[in-house]
Amino acid sequence: MTRHVTPKLGAYAGLAALGLIASLVLGLPELVVLAAPFAFVAGAALALAETADPAVEVELERERAIEGDELTLTLRLATAVAIEQLDLRLAVPDGMSLTEGENPVAVRVPGAGERDLEYTLSCERWGSYVLGAVSLGAHDRFRIFRYDRKLDFQLPLKVYPRPELVRDLLKPLETQVFTGNLVAREKGEGIEFADLRQFVPGDRVRRINWRASARRGELWVNELHAERNSDVILFLDSFTEVRGENDSTLDLAVRATAALVEQYLQHKDRVGLVSFGGVLNWLLPSSGMTQLYRVVDSLLDTEIVLNYAWKDIDVIPPRTLPPKALVIALTPLLDERAAGALLDLRARGFDLAIVEISPIPFVEPGRQELERLAYDIWKLRRDALRGEYERAGVPVAVWNDEVPLVAALEEVRAFRRYARPAHA
Amino acid sequence: MIGALALMLRSDRLAPLVAAIGLVAVLFLVVALVTRSAGLLPWALVLAGAAYAVFLVIRESSIDAWAPVYGAGLLLVSELSYWSMERRVPGAPGEGLSFRRGTLVAAACVAAGGVGGLILAMGELSVRGGLWLEALGIAAAVAAIALLARLARQ
């Protein structure tokens, strides 16, 4: 630890020297008596001072958590020299809070002893965190010296978004070529009945529909729908967000994205991610648990980066948006660039659905008439934009924290049931 | 404040002068505490010592037996002032850090008072010691300051 001399030592030495000199000059022995306590304390402190150098270990209960989880962080102190007072300050990053344990705290560490301090941290917001930054400050008995040290143990912690409940997923209009859980329009190997046709050499006997064959006097076979997977691209608008006290539109979007990714991957679909914002981030579609962790880890790094540069979908690598993929956009519909890019995607024939993360609950209408008018105009403009999407055949479902995500997806599903987009 | 008042009451002559210096010392102390200025605190103590020195000069009588009490009192004021100026870090429950520190300060003041009394007693004994003893005293004072400086450098 780095040793610092406190101003007290200079003051006490100065007072002692002044008292002794004044005593000699004025011939007053009482002034020696007046100076003696300061000299005594300074001398005793200097003679008894021992450099405090505690060994510190920091242990985190686990490296992964979900929003709302509580974790225990243990700080282990060991020292050969007794420390009268050791001030400890644990750096708690934004998005986490301390629920148990004093911070900062002063403790006494006995010589040749160990001391464990436990902190309970609450993960309030998803994200990647680095914990373990600790500031130590020790004093000697007489507070003549101060010992300081800063340690950073760099303990990584990933806090995953709180899962949203998703039951039924949006089905894409068209499927891909790999095996999955979706009943494809194409005929092939599967279990869902599609049609009947005449037997041709090479057909498997088990495919023969004996009832139809008996009725028609010749062999007829069942044709089945193939079971295929789909490509789903989650398009996360990270140009801007509206933040409330506890949540933001981006928080909701990330939670919804994480839930959708998990569900689609469970259905053997290939899932990709495009984080379209100040910083463009993408992941090519893939399937499996590895992809789940890849996408969620990528989501944890999502942040709003202010950028005025114009961006359209041309900046997105073409392989990220495979043909026939279902694109689910999660957007607060606040930035023109994202809104324009979505319309552009639709114009290029992508199967697009928009889950609008409504910023309205985060915005106060204002008290003055002018503020209320501006608020109403802003809402009308949002309605107009929504209408523009709907006219282009893109379903827009409004979702906020008060409505379950399932309801928003159902809204999209209902729209798609009756308004199928036309293909050029 | 109590020290300044006691000095004023005990003064035979020029009591207002002693009281004025004492009052300035108290003012310095208050300002130092309010502004949490550790640099100002020694000046308050110097002024308090100066008030005592003026009291001793105008008193013109035998050695003041209360000197160790004043010395210990000044140390107590100084320690408590530095304590109150420090950044406060709450102690862990059951540590009793404040109690331990308070006990240490009290013990240091009592010990310092004892040392002062011992010095005073030795001074009274050697009041007619002559030039050699005075030279020895000067050498001891210089050696004490040098020892402090050496320890501080370590």
Image (cartoon, rainbow, N blue to C red):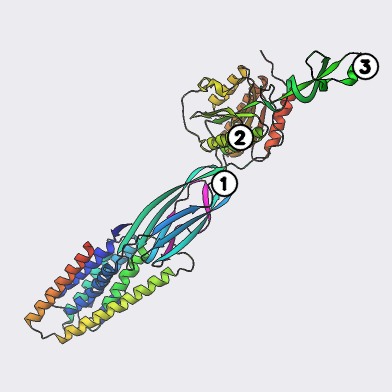
Image point 85% across, 16% down: which residue?
A: A220
Res A343 → quadrant: top right
Q: Which residues are magenta?
A: A89-109
| Subunit of label 3 | A
Against B139, is A9 above or below? above
Q: Where in the figure is residue A319, as x and y percent of width and height?
A: 55, 22
Pick the residue in front: B114 or A196.
A196
Viewer-nearest of labels 2 and 1? 1
Query: Which amino acid is tagged 2?
Result: Thr
The residue indicated by pointer 2 is: A257
Res B28 → quadrant: bottom left
Against B64, is A195 above or below? above
Query: Which amino acid is tagged 1?
Result: Ala
Please tell me whether residue A93 belongs to the stretch shown in magenta: yes
Looking at the rendered structure, whether the residues under marks 1 and 3 are on a common chain is answered as yes
The residue indicated by pointer 3 is: A215
Pick the residue in front: A318 or A124.
A318
Residue A65: mark: 1
The crowding category of the residue bearing disc 3, from other C-alpha atoms within 10 Å (few below 14, some 14 to 19, many at least 20), is few
Viewer-nearest of labels 1 and 3? 3
Report whether B74 appears left or right of A323. left
- Quadrant containing the N terminus of chain A is bottom left
Image point 66% across, 22% down: which residue?
A: A177
Image point 13% across, 85% down: which residue?
A: B127
| Subunit of label 1 | A
| Subunit of label 2 | A
